[in-house]
Image: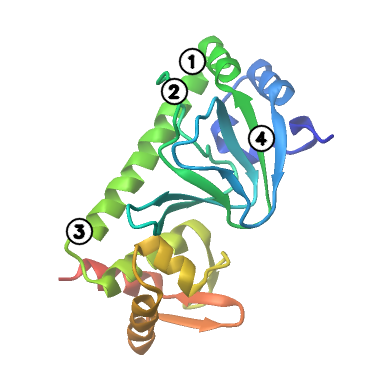
Amino acid sequence: MSKLKDYDINKVMLFNNLCSETKNQLKEKAKLKRLQRKEILFYEKEQLDRVYVLLDGKVSIFKISENGERKVIFILNNGEIINDITFDFTKNSAVGCEAFENSIVFYYSIEEFTEIMKNDFQLTKDIISYMERRTRRLYRQLKNSISIKVDKKLAAKLYRLSKEFGVCCGEWTLLNVNLTVTYLADMLGCKRETVSRMIKVLQKEELIKIDNKGFYVKESELSKYFKNN
């Protein structure tokens, strides 16, 4: 069976500042798991006693509303921690996780991981910094979801995706992620039909275009669009 030491650990930016001894411990203790597209890694409220890290691929973090509707919170890229590191005795996950595409994750027991954190304060600092950045992402999402029209919500979401997964193609930026209208609706917490209409609005404004390769956006124009009143 493959082990983490068979892969490039430098993909995990969180580990880049660590000493060789800590990196070796992380490589030795890690267990790998392969996920097929749309395979569930864990469900909301599931008890988790592991720390999951995304080695390759993409996964989505989601919540289910009281009406049973899915709201995608994040799409995570390789090198990111997937779940919160919780010391709550219940260890219940606040979110669910699904493979957005075929992916590889590795994981540790919470006990193993916290023991390594105790022995290398740099790892502890880097974990705290990572969680701070994730919290700021949530704040931005909250700001963009309150008292804002759906077309601007969509523009803000596409802009954020372009910053995370964008590939420059001249005046356009290709979103290097397999997006569908249904998935965008899940991310925005809207009906698919509503998102389809808003896509047409943004296309008419020449802010986005779609072809067989996927979604293209104009980053700076999108930013102005959703920031203007």
Which residue does the image show at 48% across and 45% down from the upper left?
A: 96
Q: Residue furthest top?
A: 119
Q: Residue 120: percent from the left, percent from the top?
A: 54, 14
Q: Earlier in the sequence, mark 4 or mark 1?
A: 4
Q: Residue 62: percent from the left, percent from the top?
A: 44, 50
Cβ atoms under marks 4 and 1 closer than 8 Å: no
**Which residue in the protein does label 4 denote?**
106
How packed is label 4: few (under 14 Cα within 10 Å), some, or many (20 or more)?
many
**Which residue in the protein does label 3 denote?**
146
Which element is circle 4 on?
Answer: strand
Q: Earlier in the sequence, mark 4 or mark 2?
A: 4
Which quarter of the figure has residue 207? bottom left
**Which residue in the protein does label 2 denote?**
125
**Which residue in the protein does label 1 denote?**
121
Q: Residue 149: percent from the left, percent from the top?
A: 22, 71
Depth order, front residue of 215/224: 215
How packed is label 3: few (under 14 Cα within 10 Å), some, or many (20 or more)?
few
Residue type at mark 4 is: Phe
Cβ atoms under marks 2 and 1 closer than 8 Å: yes
Which quadrant is home to the C terminus? bottom left
**What is the spatial separation of the Cα atoms under label 4 and label 3, in whole angstroms?**
36 Å
- In this rendering, position of residue 209 left or right of residue 53: left
Q: Earlier in the sequence, mark 4 or mark 3?
A: 4
Residue type at mark 2 is: Lys
Cβ atoms under marks 4 and 2 closer than 8 Å: no
Which quarter of the figure has residue 196? bottom left
Which quadrant is home to the N terminus? top right
Q: Earlier in the sequence, mark 2 or mark 3?
A: 2
Residue 155's disc is: none
Q: In the figure, 199 relative to 69: above or below? A: below
The mark lying in front, picked from 3 and 1, is 3
